[in-house]
Amino acid sequence: MDRVLRWGVLATGGIAATFTEDLGALPDAEVVAVASRTRASAEAFAERFGIPRAYGDWASLAADEEVDVVYVATPHSAHREAAALCLEAGKHVLCEKAFTLNAREAGELVKLARERGLFLMEGMWTYCNPVIRRMTELVRDGAIGEIRTVQADFGLAGPFGPGHRLRDPALGGGALLDLGVYPVSFAHLLLGEPDRVQADALLSPEGVDLNTAMLLGWSEAGASALLNCSIVADTPLTAAVTGTRGRIDFPRGFFYPERFVLHREGREPEEFTAGAADGAGQGLRGMQFEQAEVARALRAGETESPLVPLDGSLAVMRTLDAVRDRIGVRYPADGLG
């Protein structure tokens, strides 16, 4: 695939707009079609971003022969349906996080993509961020010794009223899938899947989590992670990784960072920052890094990204399922299949 990569965008919400804006930073990619459940919404989005084709249904986008890969930007509750539709039509897919509502749905998508020989990736943009990648290199090289603790949080004050999608169980509402997926994925990136999961939460009258605390454990590594997410409190949005010989601190916005500080025994703190080559100062949100990784993988003939591997996404979904089990949050889709 040595020509311009042609994207289709499925859904027209805020994250779809951010994705389309950031894609403009890549010289070898363009959005050629957009789809929504209503034609009016698709046409308005297409006019806003100069997209040549707009569809009032998802199937038409999936059938568009000039679309190479589809970005699924719907709420979590529709991820499985939308991604499966595109995969069944022979399209490669980048599916926004959280990957699906639960591990069962995620497994179904992974199985379908592997059977069809198609590329599939969860849109965990944090994993593709060059600053995060530099951090993982340092940890892997032993810069802070053996990891002992991970701390991360993601909370917004809202308020999100009863009619908001974040309060609707049918839409995968609550703090965990929208925000908690970032701290959980951050811990997974460093330590893999935990073998112990504890959690406590404040639930809404609708039955979704408003505020959740998680304690994950890794017996073999001797490590633990203390993670928080909230849709009723503006938390620091920071992260820290502590090892036997040092610590790495991320300031507010750890999930799309431009810098971190490395503390090592006997040395002055070292700050690592994003440079111009990393997209700093371009006014972008950072989605161009996951977009570039999709393009790289497709041009290399890969059906999975080594940066955001499917087995890793499945493991994160299992952990999220375990957390929901501990705090008593169930979605209508959990009882299907």
Image (spheres, grey):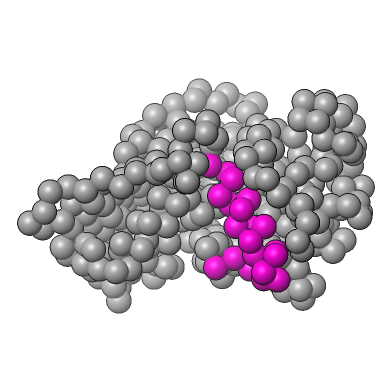
Residue 292 magenta? yes
| Quadrant of residue 293 within the rendered picture | bottom right
Give the side of residue 238 with respect to residue 1, left or right. Answer: left
Q: Residue at x 91, y 55 (%)?
A: 65
User: Which image quadrant: the N terminus?
Assistant: bottom right
Asked whether the viewer can see residue 65, the reply is yes
User: Which residue in the rendered view is the most extreme toward the left?
Assistant: 266
Q: Position of residue 114 (x, y in %)?
A: 72, 74
At horizontal 43% and vertical 62% (from top left) the residue drawn is 188
Q: Nearer the viewer, residue 288 or 44?
A: 288
Q: Where 282 falls versus 98 (above or below)?
A: above
Q: Where is residue 206 drawn, in percent x and y?
A: 58, 36
Q: Is residue 286 left or right of residue 264?
A: right
**Residue at the image position 39 percent from the left and 70 percent from the top:** 195
The residue positioned 71% from the left and 43% from the top of the image is: 74
76 to the left or right of 40: left
* Depicted 202 relative to depicted 97: above or below: above
Q: Is residue 196 visible?
A: no
Residue 210 in the image: state x and y as whole percent: 47, 36
Q: Main secondary structure of the magenta part?
A: helix
| Image position, residue 267 (x, y; %) | 11, 54
Determine if the magenta segment contains residue 157. no
191 versus 259 height, above or below:
below
Which span of residues is magenta-colored? Answer: 286-306
Looking at the rendered image, the quarter that the C terminus falls into is bottom right
Count of numbered labels shown in the rendering: 0
